[in-house]
Image (tube, rainbow, N blue to C red):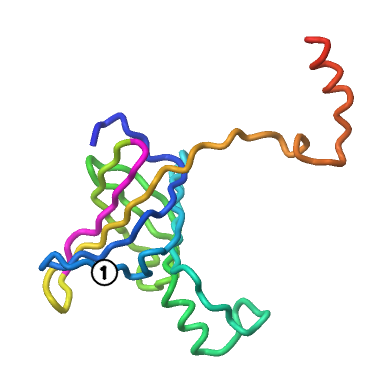
Amino acid sequence: MPPSVNLAGSWKLLAWRRIEQDGSTTYPLGEDATGVLIYAADGSMAVQMTAAHRPAIRSENALGGDLHERAQAYSTCLAYFGTWEVQADTVIHRLDASLYPNWSGTLQSRPFECDGSTLVLRTPPSSGKDGTVVNEMSWSRIPTRVSTPATARDPTVDRTADSALAKSGD
């Protein structure tokens, strides 16, 4: 990775692949999973990945519903937030909290490759039931949107004076 690559920004999930020692690949949340990874310039970060087409829970209470339905929803989503920093070719995630509670308060190291528009994060190899496993998450940079003040989008704000100034060239 060139040292000039800046990871700060928002990234859209392209794929989460689980690569087994024998080279076989599975997709933990499906081949059409979706997600976002945000690396803020202030060092904060958040990530969420979900399976596509998740069934709704038959409850209006976000913390309620049938236990089986909630377990299914939990099993089709991974999310955490905290802070981040780059150390050589590894990005370190310091997790404040995670949907998977065992990760809350931990460090998660992700060796990475980035060409500026595509980011690939990998987990360090771990032992699985069939040998070594590496999880690989591929991301595409989301273009930066031009930020406008809230009043510029507010239809109740009178911009007559702004329009007159723009037309007069002042």
* Position of residue 137 measured from the top left corner of the image (x, y, whole percent): 31, 56
Residue drawn 43% across and 73% down? 76
The residue at 24%/32% (across/down) is: 2
Q: Nearer the viewer, residue 126 or 59?
A: 59
Nearest the eye: 130 or 62:
130
Q: Is residue 35 magenta?
A: no
Please tell me which residue is depicted at 46% across the width and 54% down the height of the picture: 36
Q: Amino acid at mark 1?
A: Thr
Q: Left or right of 127: which side holds 158?
A: right
Displayed quadrant of residue 147: top right
Q: Position of residue 161 (x, y in %)?
A: 88, 22
Q: Is residue 81 above or below residue 86?
A: below
Q: Quadrant where the C terminus lies?
A: top right
- Count neighbours of disc 1 (C-alpha within 10 A) and say few if under 14, some if 14 to 19, many if 20 or more: some
Decide if residue 11 is on the left or right side of residue 70: left
**Residue annotated with mark 1:** 26
Quarter of the image where the N terminus is located? top left
Q: Is residue 100 above or below residue 47?
A: below
What span is in magenta?
116-126
Picture layout, residue 69 above or below residue 17: below
User: In the rendered picture of this protein, how many numbered marks are placed on residues?
Assistant: 1
Tell me which corner region of the image, top left, top right, bottom left or bottom right, holds residue 30.
Answer: bottom left
* x, y percent for residue 158: 89, 32
Residue 112 pos. (x, y %): 26, 47
> Is label 1 in a helix, a strand or a loop?
strand
When asked about the image quadrant of residue 4, the answer is top left
Residue 119 is inside the magenta segment: yes
Q: Residue at x 37, y 50 (%)?
A: 139
